[in-house]
Amino acid sequence: MVSQDMASTRLEILKTMVAQNPNDSFSRYGLAMEYRKASDLEAAIGEFRALVAAAPDYAAAYFHGGQTLELLGRLEEARQLYREGIEATTRKGDLHTRSEIQAALDLLG
Protein backbone atom coordinates (compact mmCIF):
# COMPACT_ATOMS: atom_id res chain seq x y z
CA MET A 1 0.00 0.00 0.00
CA VAL A 2 1.36 3.42 -0.95
CA SER A 3 1.25 6.01 1.79
CA GLN A 4 -0.29 9.43 1.26
CA ASP A 5 3.16 10.98 1.77
CA MET A 6 4.67 8.88 -1.02
CA ALA A 7 1.83 9.80 -3.38
CA SER A 8 2.24 13.49 -2.52
CA THR A 9 5.97 13.23 -3.09
CA ARG A 10 5.47 11.57 -6.50
CA LEU A 11 3.01 14.30 -7.46
CA GLU A 12 5.44 17.03 -6.37
CA ILE A 13 8.34 15.40 -8.23
CA LEU A 14 6.29 15.16 -11.44
CA LYS A 15 5.09 18.76 -11.11
CA THR A 16 8.70 19.87 -10.76
CA MET A 17 9.77 17.79 -13.76
CA VAL A 18 7.02 19.29 -15.94
CA ALA A 19 7.84 22.81 -14.71
CA GLN A 20 11.51 22.28 -15.62
CA ASN A 21 10.75 20.74 -19.01
CA PRO A 22 7.16 21.45 -20.16
CA ASN A 23 7.77 19.67 -23.48
CA ASP A 24 8.67 16.34 -21.86
CA SER A 25 5.68 14.27 -22.90
CA PHE A 26 6.49 11.35 -20.62
CA SER A 27 6.63 13.54 -17.50
CA ARG A 28 3.43 15.36 -18.42
CA TYR A 29 1.66 12.04 -19.03
CA GLY A 30 2.93 10.80 -15.66
CA LEU A 31 1.64 13.95 -13.98
CA ALA A 32 -1.78 13.58 -15.61
CA MET A 33 -2.02 9.96 -14.48
CA GLU A 34 -0.88 10.85 -10.96
CA TYR A 35 -3.56 13.56 -10.74
CA ARG A 36 -6.10 11.02 -11.94
CA LYS A 37 -4.95 8.49 -9.36
CA ALA A 38 -5.30 11.19 -6.68
CA SER A 39 -8.89 11.86 -7.92
CA ASP A 40 -8.00 15.39 -9.04
CA LEU A 41 -9.74 14.81 -12.36
CA GLU A 42 -9.87 18.46 -13.45
CA ALA A 43 -6.10 18.78 -13.03
CA ALA A 44 -5.65 15.49 -14.90
CA ILE A 45 -7.74 16.78 -17.82
CA GLY A 46 -5.66 19.96 -17.90
CA GLU A 47 -2.50 17.91 -18.22
CA PHE A 48 -3.97 15.55 -20.83
CA ARG A 49 -5.07 18.56 -22.90
CA ALA A 50 -1.65 20.20 -22.56
CA LEU A 51 -0.02 16.93 -23.60
CA VAL A 52 -2.22 16.58 -26.69
CA ALA A 53 -1.48 20.19 -27.64
CA ALA A 54 2.29 19.70 -27.28
CA ALA A 55 2.49 16.14 -28.62
CA PRO A 56 -0.51 15.41 -30.85
CA ASP A 57 0.70 11.86 -31.55
CA TYR A 58 0.80 10.82 -27.87
CA ALA A 59 -2.02 8.29 -28.24
CA ALA A 60 -2.41 7.33 -24.59
CA ALA A 61 -3.35 10.91 -23.73
CA TYR A 62 -6.48 10.65 -25.88
CA PHE A 63 -7.55 7.33 -24.38
CA HIS A 64 -6.94 8.18 -20.73
CA GLY A 65 -8.07 11.78 -21.21
CA GLY A 66 -11.33 10.51 -22.68
CA GLN A 67 -11.80 8.08 -19.81
CA THR A 68 -11.20 10.89 -17.32
CA LEU A 69 -13.78 13.08 -19.06
CA GLU A 70 -16.21 10.17 -18.83
CA LEU A 71 -15.61 9.97 -15.08
CA LEU A 72 -16.48 13.66 -14.88
CA GLY A 73 -19.69 13.04 -16.82
CA ARG A 74 -18.48 15.20 -19.72
CA LEU A 75 -19.45 12.68 -22.36
CA GLU A 76 -19.52 14.93 -25.42
CA GLU A 77 -16.01 16.18 -24.62
CA ALA A 78 -14.91 12.56 -24.16
CA ARG A 79 -16.36 11.65 -27.57
CA GLN A 80 -14.51 14.56 -29.17
CA LEU A 81 -11.20 13.61 -27.55
CA TYR A 82 -11.66 9.99 -28.63
CA ARG A 83 -12.35 11.16 -32.21
CA GLU A 84 -9.18 13.25 -32.16
CA GLY A 85 -7.32 10.20 -30.84
CA ILE A 86 -8.62 8.07 -33.69
CA GLU A 87 -7.34 10.67 -36.16
CA ALA A 88 -3.94 10.83 -34.43
CA THR A 89 -3.48 7.07 -34.26
CA THR A 90 -4.58 6.69 -37.87
CA ARG A 91 -1.95 9.27 -38.91
CA LYS A 92 0.67 7.45 -36.87
CA GLY A 93 -0.37 3.98 -38.05
CA ASP A 94 -0.97 2.81 -34.46
CA LEU A 95 -3.80 0.41 -35.21
CA HIS A 96 -3.81 -1.28 -31.80
CA THR A 97 -4.36 1.95 -29.86
CA ARG A 98 -6.75 3.17 -32.54
CA SER A 99 -8.92 0.09 -31.96
CA GLU A 100 -8.89 0.67 -28.18
CA ILE A 101 -9.95 4.29 -28.61
CA GLN A 102 -12.61 3.26 -31.14
CA ALA A 103 -13.98 0.70 -28.66
CA ALA A 104 -14.18 3.37 -25.95
CA LEU A 105 -16.00 5.70 -28.36
CA ASP A 106 -18.37 2.90 -29.41
CA LEU A 107 -19.27 2.22 -25.76
CA LEU A 108 -20.36 5.85 -25.40
CA GLY A 109 -22.65 5.47 -28.40
Image: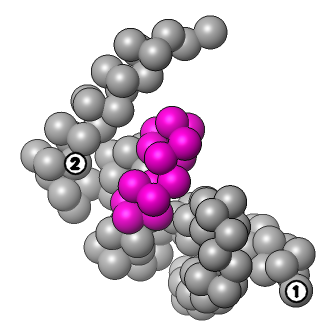
Task: State the scheme by which the image is colored.
Answer: one colour
Quadrant the C terminus occupies: bottom right
Q: Give percent across and percent down for residue 11.
A: 34, 32
Gap between marks 2 and 1 measured at Cα: 35 Å
Residue holding disc 1: 109
Residue at image position (88%, 75%) is: 107
Q: How many marks?
A: 2
Query: Which residues are the magenta region?
Result: 34-47
Residue at image position (66%, 86%) is: 76
Question: Which residue is more in the foreground, 83 or 43?
Answer: 43
**SS for callout 1:** loop
Q: Give percent across and percent down for residue 15.
A: 24, 41
Question: Which residue is more in the foreground, 98 or 52?
Answer: 52
Residue holding disc 2: 18
Between marks 2 and 1 in the image, the one whose residue lies nearer the viewer: 1
Q: How crowded is mark 1: few (under 14 residues within 10 Å), some or many (20 or more)?
A: few
Query: Which amino acid type corresponds to the residue marked 2 in the rendered image?
Result: Val
Q: Residue furthest front?
A: 73
In the displayed structure, 109 sits above or below 6; it is: below
**Main SS category, magenta section:** helix
Q: Residues within 10 Å of mark 2 (few under 14, many from 20)?
A: many
In the displayed structure, 43 sits above or below 3; it is: below
Quadrant the N terminus occupies: top right
Whether residue 26 appears in this view of the structure is: no
